Image (cartoon, rainbow, N blue to C red):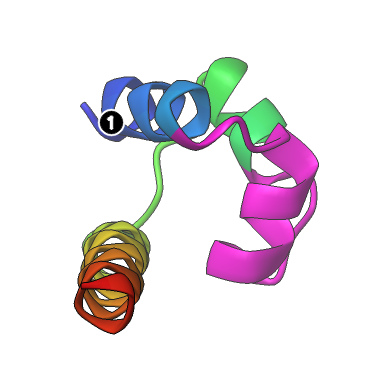
């Protein structure tokens, strides 16, 4: 389920649900609606998962660059 992945992402990144909604779906109520049972379309779910994957990849790149710069 998408909501489980989103909730895990929010905890890992200490991100507010409304901020995630604005960034990932351009809808600050997106996560709140998921919590209330909203079922997003497949295309929307793919876009949200892509956002989370891209966020993780960008974070990892920045961390690796910082390590390389310090070393």
Residue 55: x and y in percent read: 36, 66
Point 27% across, 80% down: residue: 65
Q: How would you classify the magenta stretch by its main secondary structure?
A: helix
Specify the quadrant of the image occupied by residue 32. top right
Quarter of the picture containing the N terminus is top left
- Can residue 48 be seen here? yes
Point 60% across, 30% down: residue: 14
- Can residue 43 be seen here? no
Specify the quadrant of the image occupied by residue 7. top left
Residue 67: x and y in percent read: 25, 67
- Give the structural element (helix, strand or loop) at label 1: helix
Point 73% across, 35% down: residue: 16
| On screen, residue 34 above or below 28 | above
| On screen, residue 63 above or below 3 | below
| On screen, residue 55 above or below 32 | below
Q: Residue 32 colored magenta? A: no
Residue nearest the observer in this picture, 44 or 9: 9
Which residue corresponds to mark 1?
5
Point 33% across, 57% down: residue: 52
Query: What range of the chain is rendered magenta?
Result: 13-30
| On screen, residue 32 above or below 15 | above
Q: Image check: 43 left or right of 28?
A: left
Residue nearest the observer in this picture, 56 or 33: 56
Q: Residues within 10 Å of mark 1 (few under 14, many from 20)?
A: few
């Amino acid at each position: 389920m998408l909501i489980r992945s989103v909730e895990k992402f929010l905890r890992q990144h200490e991100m507010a649900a409304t901020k995630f909604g604005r960034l990932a779906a351009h809808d600050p109520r997106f996560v709140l609606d998921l919590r209330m049972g909203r079922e997003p379309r497949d295309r929307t779910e793919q876009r949200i998962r892509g956002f989370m994957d891209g966020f993780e990849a960008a974070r990892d790149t920045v961390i690796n660059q910082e390590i390389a710069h310090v070393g």
